[in-house]
């Protein structure tokens, strides 16, 4: 059995890394009391809270936090007709926060994620580890058997090509979870009491050409490098699928990172995931995705972007056309999703016009 860390008495970090270059994005339908536990590590940073559900409900944020809060009315006001690309009644709404941020880096966390303890009992500063991951290169072209060679106490092993030791820029840092694992509904149903107690002290680069199941509850990324591809799709209210928002974004960002020569890391940091969602409710949301993914994943495995696609936006528009062409036969939903991908990019570019010389 694992428990969350006790952060009472830990002072707020007086010298936080990248304080003015990073936003924390939190999707929620409830009061954010969980931020009390995170105060020592997160209070110095600016929060972007995306309120899902009833926009008239007041969300309480603990005192001392600097934040801006957006509800559905705000999303409709800011995006106008393009607001249709932002999901409703689903945590996929978090990607609106990515769009309105003006910072270089994003850390996103769910409101049921608490501070974890490492094996020595020390509270884990998840954000600090994510920043370290993002600021160090990745090695997607050749696997290092000592995992991240840039960590203290590690290096490139014998036989690792010297020509590849510079690595590539890291676009995404994908963290993990103690206690409640990120399982799909069928696995939840057959293993209702399973808890993750294993803390693996490792960070690794996901190799080029390999997809992965991205979880959005403990995630950081370089918005300048990959931000326009971090679209969590159409999920939730009015859609035939849910709980595949982060998966969709993960498949998209991985093929684009591979194409553009960027890296994706997974492993540390851990958070403590406090609450198991209802597996029967999850099954209703997931069941189409469980079938569809057997076609979706081979589709992404075979994506070949053109040499002309040299920006994230260009890659994403190309990908949207492939989705429409190859996946619409699965279900009309994918035709709608492909259109939403284009709308997302148009909205992103309107709110984030390219800098002029």
Image (tube, rainbow, N blue to C red):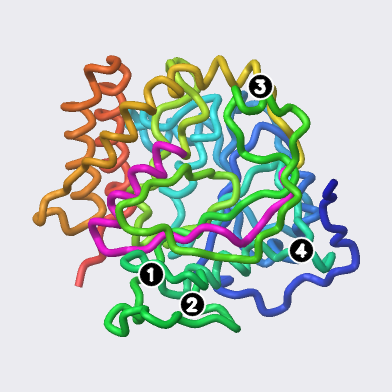
Residue to which mark 3 is pinned:
279
Q: Is residue 161 or residue 119 the one in the foreground?
A: 161
Seen at 71% across and 34% down, the residue is 30
Of the image marks 4 and 1, the number of the one nearer the N terminus: 4
Q: Is residue 168 magenta?
A: no
Q: Quadrant of residue 157?
A: bottom left
Q: Quadrant of residue 33?
A: top right
* Measured Cα–Cα span from mark 3 to mark 2: 39 Å
**Residue wearing tag 4:** 118
Is 142 rendered above or below residue 311? Answer: below
Q: Is disc 1 placed on a helix, strand or loop? A: loop
Q: Nearer the viewer, mark 4 or mark 2?
A: 2
Residue at the spot x=64%, y=43% of the render?
110
Q: Is residue 325 left or right of residue 95?
A: left
- Callout 3–callout 2 Cβ contact below 8 Å: no
Quarter residue 232 falls in: top left
């Amino acid at each position: 059995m694992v428990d969350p860390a006790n952060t009472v008495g830990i002072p707020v970090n007086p010298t936080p890394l990248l304080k003015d270059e990073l936003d924390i994005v939190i999707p929620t339908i409830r009061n954010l009391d969980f931020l009390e536990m995170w105060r020592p590590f997160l209070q110095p940073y600016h929060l972007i809270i995306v309120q899902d559900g009833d926009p008239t409900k007041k969300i309480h944020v603990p005192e001392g936090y600097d934040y801006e809060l957006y509800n559905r009315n705000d999303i409709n006001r800011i995006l106008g007709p393009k607001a249709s690309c932002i999901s409703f009644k689903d945590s996929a709404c978090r990607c609106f926060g990515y769009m309105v941020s003006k910072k270089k880096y994003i850390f996103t966390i769910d409101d049921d994620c608490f501070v974890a303890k490492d094996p020595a009992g020390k509270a884990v500063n998840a954000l600090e580890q994510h920043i370290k991951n993002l600021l160090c290169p990745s090695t997607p072209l050749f696997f290092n058997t000592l995992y991240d060679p840039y960590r203290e106490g590690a290096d490139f092993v014998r036989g690792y090509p010297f020509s590849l030791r510079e690595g590539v820029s890291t676009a995404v840092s994908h963290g993990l979870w103690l206690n409640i694992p990120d399982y799909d509904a069928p696995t939840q149903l057959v293993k209702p009491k399973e808890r993750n107690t294993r803390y693996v002290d490792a960070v690794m680069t996901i190799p080029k050409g390999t997809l992965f199941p991205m979880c959005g509850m403990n995630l950081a990324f370089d918005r300048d490098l990959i931000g326009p591809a971090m679209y969590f799709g159409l999920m939730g209210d009015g859609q035939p699928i849910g709980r595949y928002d982060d998966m969709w974004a993960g498949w998209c960002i991985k093929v684009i990172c591979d194409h553009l020569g960027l890296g994706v890391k997974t492993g540390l940091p851990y958070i403590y995931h406090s609450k198991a969602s209802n597996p029967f409710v999850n099954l209703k949301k997931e069941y189409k995705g469980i079938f569809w993914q057997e076609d979706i994943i081979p589709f992404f495995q075979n994506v070949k972007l053109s040499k002309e696609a040299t920006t994230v936006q260009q890659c994403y528009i190309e990908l949207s056309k492939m989705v429409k062409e190859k996946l619409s036969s699965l279900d009309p939903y994918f035709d709608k999703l492909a259109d939403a991908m284009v709308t997302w990019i148009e909205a992103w570019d309107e709110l984030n016009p390219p800098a002029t010389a």
